[in-house]
């Protein structure tokens, strides 16, 4: 574990994130999903919480939850903050972010976006993708 003093600020538009789940998960319905890390089933986007952003990052804020394409993150680095908190953070490729939420996702799946019912609708008008 690496003790750090002060604040870590990523360069350019880079993102540092925590709380990326690779272990066993439980759905809202109570179904336990075994860890799929290191298996072909584990190749999927994952949610994580933004811990720090670079000075050029304008689309994402600290505290946001972001959905990241598989493999667009580094291995985790465990650090001990000045307050004694142990965290594991990863650098996220900003071009790999495919969704942003200001609330923690409540389920482990992306859901079925194929056919909205009459009681639900999806507004993707504010989504932008840089190519």
Image (cartoon, rainbow, N blue to C red):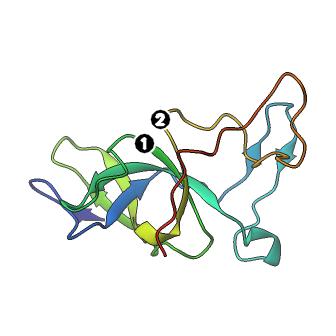
Quadrant location of the N terminus in the rendered image: bottom left
Residue sitting at x 85%, y 21% = 119
Mark 1 and mark 2 residues within 8 Å of each other at the beta carbon = yes
User: In the rendered image of this protein, does residue 111 appear above or below residue 29?
Assistant: below
Residue sitting at x 67%, y 57% = 23
Secondary structure under the numbered disc 2 in the rendered image: loop
Q: Residues within 10 Å of mark 1 (few under 14, many from 20)?
A: some
Q: Position of residue 36 (x, y in %)?
A: 76, 66
Secondary structure under the numbered disc 1 in the rendered image: loop
Is residue 95 or residue 4 the one in the foreground?
A: 95
Figure label count: 2
Is residue 32 or residue 67 the one in the foreground?
A: 67
Q: Position of residue 111 (x, y in %)?
A: 81, 45
The residue where tag 2 is placed is 102
Residue sitting at x 27%, y 56% = 53
Residue furthest front in the image: 125
Q: Position of residue 8 (x, y in %)?
A: 18, 60
Is residue 101 or residue 120 the one in the foreground?
A: 120
The residue where tag 1 is placed is 64
Q: Position of residue 87 (x, y in %)?
A: 36, 52
């Amino acid at each position: 574990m690496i003790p750090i003093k002060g604040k870590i600020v990523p360069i350019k538009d880079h993102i540092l994130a925590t709380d990326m789940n690779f272990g066993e998960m439980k759905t809202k319905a109570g179904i336990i999903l075994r860890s799929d890390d290191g298996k072909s089933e584990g190749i999927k986007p994952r949610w994580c919480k933004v811990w720090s952003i670079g000075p050029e990052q304008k689309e994402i804020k600290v505290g946001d939850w972001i959905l990241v394409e598989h493999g667009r993150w580094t291995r985790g680095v465990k650090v001990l903050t000045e307050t004694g908190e142990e965290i594991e953070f990863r650098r996220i490729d900003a071009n790999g972010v495919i969704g942003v939420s200001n609330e923690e996702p409540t389920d482990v799946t992306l859901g079925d976006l194929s056919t909205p019912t009459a009681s639900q609708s999806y507004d993707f008008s504010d989504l932008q993708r840089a190519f």
